[in-house]
Image (tube, rainbow, N blue to C red):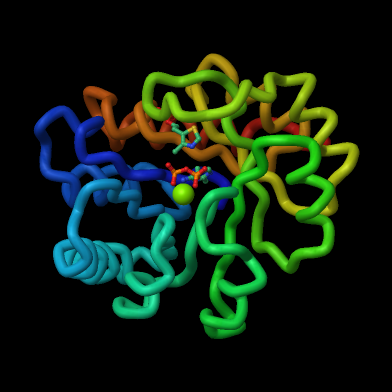
Amino acid sequence: MQLYLVTDENACLGRDIFRVVEEAVKGGVTMVQLREKSLGTRAFIDRAKKMKDILHPYHVPLIINDRVDVALACDADGVHVGQSDMPYEILKDLLPPDKIIGLSAETKEDVIEAENLNLTYLAVSPLFSTPSKTDTLAPWGMDGLKWVKAHSKNPLVVIGGLNESNVVEAISNGAEGIAVISAICSAASPFKAAKFLKSMINNTNKI
Ligand SMILES: Cc1ncc(COP(=O)(O)OP(=O)(O)O)c(N)n1
Ligand SMILES: Cc1ncsc1CCOP(=O)(O)O
Ligand SMILES: [Mg+2]
């Protein structure tokens, strides 16, 4: 999950979403989340199956946002849920044990509660405010990330406003993964954007 691409068709600026994702994967994206907020169930499943076929040759896992039924239907590699989505306790019994489970933490209470869960990663969400998602609580900011790092055993992903100007600081402060929508989906070249972000991540010293 080093460089984690979260999809948003609108952010792809009219380009084909599968093309954007494949370019990004060629550039170095290590995990992809299919995030569809308005597709019907059948169309979501069709899109997820096609995305899985595209990612398979690259050995890049496919995560489904919000919908465990869609993840099961296409045998995706995992699910990402937030604090208003299906509770972890129910989700873990529905998913096969080897699947990835990611959870968003929006508050300090969320972080402490997540200490008892067997998560693949905890998302510090949002790290910074972002036009890509406006229905959020207050951003954590870098000091918030430091607090989470000090209080959580879970591997941390940061999301919200991440780009080449702040990736190094986020990694230096304890993020294991950087999740982005616009920095890749809306880049002139998703391939070059992913390649550059990946090189920044690889060259940064972790704490
Ligand atoms: C990696 C990652 N982190 C956080 C989120 C946000 O999840 P959530 O709070 O459930 O909001 P929606 O994305 O469902 O609008 C995410 N999707 N991915
Ligand atoms: C899905 C999501 N969850 C928290 S912030 C966010 C959007 C991130 O988009 P961007 O990388 O463009 O800021
Ligand atoms: Mg959600």
Q: Is residue 131 left or right of residue 126?
A: left
- Residue 126 place in picture, x, y as percent: 57, 30
Quadrant location of residue 181? top left
Q: Which residue is depicted at the point 73% across and 68% down?
A: 118
The image quadrant where one finds ligand 2 is top left
- Residue 20 place in picture, x, y as percent: 22, 42
Q: Which residue is depicted at the point 51% across and 55% down?
A: 85
Q: Is residue 88 above or below residue 28?
A: below
Q: Which residue is depicted at the point 11% across and 36% down?
A: 15
Q: Which residue is depicted at the point 23% across and 69% down?
A: 45
Residue at the far top in the pictured view = 165
Q: Is residue 58 left or right of residue 138?
A: left
Q: Is residue 16 above or below residue 74?
A: above
Pick the residue in front: 182 or 207.
Answer: 182
The quadrant the C terminus occupies is: top right
Q: Is residue 16 above or below residue 62?
A: above
Q: Is residue 194 left or right of residue 205?
A: left
Q: Is residue 26 left or right of residue 137?
A: left
